[in-house]
Image: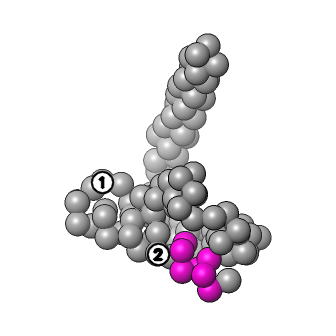
Amino acid sequence: MIKSLGIIFGCLLLGDVISGVLYLPIPGNVIGMLLLTLALTRHLVRLEDVKPTADLLVKNLALLFVPPGVGLILYFDLLQKEFVAIVISFLVSTFLVLAIVGYVQQKLEKE
C-alpha cells in the first residue's frame, strides 16, 4: 500500500513540478495522470504496484466530490445568473467531443 501511494503521489508531484517549471496551462494533476499512464503502458510500473491504492481511491470517489460540490454553493448566485450560457456551452462541448471522438474512432478502425 505504501509503495502504491508513493508511486501515485510521486507522479502527482512530478506533474505539479513540470506544470510549474514549464508554465504550462495544463494542471499538474493531469500531467501526473498522463505520466502514470505512460509508466504503466511502458511497463515501467507494474499494475499490481498501484492497484491497492487505486482501488481504494475509486471505492471512495464519492467523498472526493464533496468539497467541490460545497464550493459550488458559494457561487450559486453567479451560476443562477449564467445558467443559460453554462447549459449551452455544456451541450455544445459534449456534442463536439462525441462527434470528434466518433470521427477519430472511425478513421482508426479503417487503418
Vertical order, 6 against 37 (above or below): below
Question: Which quadrant holds residue 20?
Answer: bottom left
Q: Residue 54: horizontal and vertical position, in percent?
A: 68, 69
Q: Characterize the local packing of mark 2: few (<14), some (14-19) or many (20 or more) Cα atoms within 10 angstroms.
A: some
**SS category of the residue bearing label 1:** loop
**SS category of the residue bearing label 2:** helix
Question: Which quadrant holds residue 18?
Answer: bottom left
Vertical order, 66 against 82 (above or below): below
Residue depicted at x 68% and y 83%: 1
Residue depicted at x 53% and y 53%: 42
Q: Nearer the viewer, residue 44 or 108?
A: 44
Vertical order, 101 against 107 (above or below): below
Q: Residue 46: horizontal and vertical position, in percent?
A: 63, 64
Horizontal arrangement in the rendering, residue 20 relative to residue 93 (left or right): left
Horizontal arrangement in the rendering, residue 40 relative to residue 21 (left or right): right
Q: Earlier in the sequence, mark 2 or mark 1?
A: 2
